[in-house]
Amino acid sequence: MTLQNTLLPVQTTLQSKGRLLDLSKPVIMGILNATPDSFYNKGRESGIDELLRKADKMQEEGATILDIGGASTKPGAAIISTDEELSRVIPVIGAIYKYFPDVWLSVDTYNASVAKEAILAGVSVINDVSSGRFDKEMLRTVASFKVPYIAMHMQGTPETMQKDPQYTDVVKEVRDYLKDISTQCAEEGIVDIIIDPGFGFGKTVEHNFALLNSLHTFRILGKPILAGLSRKSMICKALKVNPESALNGTTALNMVALLQGASILRVHDVKEAKEVIKLAQFLI
């Protein structure tokens, strides 16, 4: 009997703008960075034409969701202005929505006004690394548009999160945090909530692997789990490689996340993630 056979059931559908997303089998979220300082692509994909080509490739390779971000959240990153973030993401969202209207789009933002404009431009999911901590209007905004919300755990801010993160029991503390924020979301009127333990966001390598090893326990919250492990520092530090050389490690840990019950894999490399999901089906 595999771990998956013993897992608690979680929500398996998301609704947004009259559409239904089936999560009874794991799906892939492809990362599209409209930033000049991503920890991985370093701006190589930030132009609209290049992002359109990347979006086309990702949806052809099997991405169900495309996640567009205009504000870097790598360790040490400073919060940018709303106007700058809007100028980066809204034209990209509009272009991708025009050419690929059937793909689910999400926006990676901690800013309520960016979330609002992104939804109006074609986004169906809000992905917030701050879980509403950075903008008190975020939860109300998401609730008003009745779109799914990804709530992530982060200790501190991107600028400070990797400066000596401390926990007494990282698994319990992160799980309790996500339980509390799920309750807050529900009280605001958000129906569809996805939880993300925030690998690499205010955690040491040891914290990250402890969370991954106990990811199945988060299913007690009844929410779909997103695993964002792609080319993260936990892989690079453990293998002593740079992000460009961390695909093999990413693939290995994505398999672990699937067997632990993840519903969504957030990745830079869609083809390889799709293969992992296909193989995991033989084990689940």
Image (spheres, rainbow, N blue to C red):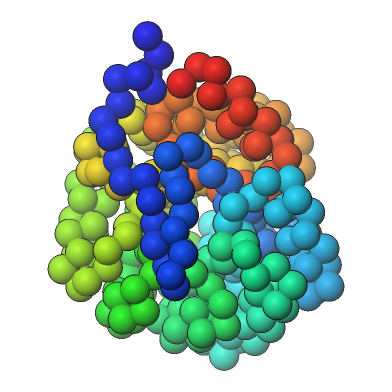
Q: Residue 128, image x and y in percent?
A: 42, 65
Q: Is residue 159 above or below residue 9?
A: below
Residue at image x 23%, y 57%? 182
Q: Residue furthest top?
A: 1
Q: Is residue 6 above or below residue 63?
A: above
Viewer-closest of 201 and 126 = 126
Residue at image x 44%, y 45%? 23
Q: How many marks are shown on the rendered structure?
A: 0
Q: Is residue 100 above or below residue 28?
A: below
Q: Please say whether residue 195 is visible from this viewpoint.
A: yes
> Which picture quadrant has residue 218?
top left
Viewer-closest of 99 and 130 = 99
Q: Is residue 148 above or below residue 145?
A: above
In the shown orientation, is residue 188 left or right of residue 116? Answer: left
Q: Please say whether residue 164 is visible from this viewpoint.
A: no
> Which picture quadrant has residue 16?
bottom left
Q: Residue 112, image x and y in percent?
A: 40, 81
Q: Quadrant of the N terminus?
A: top left
In the shown orientation, is residue 258 left or right of residue 48? Answer: left
Q: Residue furthest bottom?
A: 83
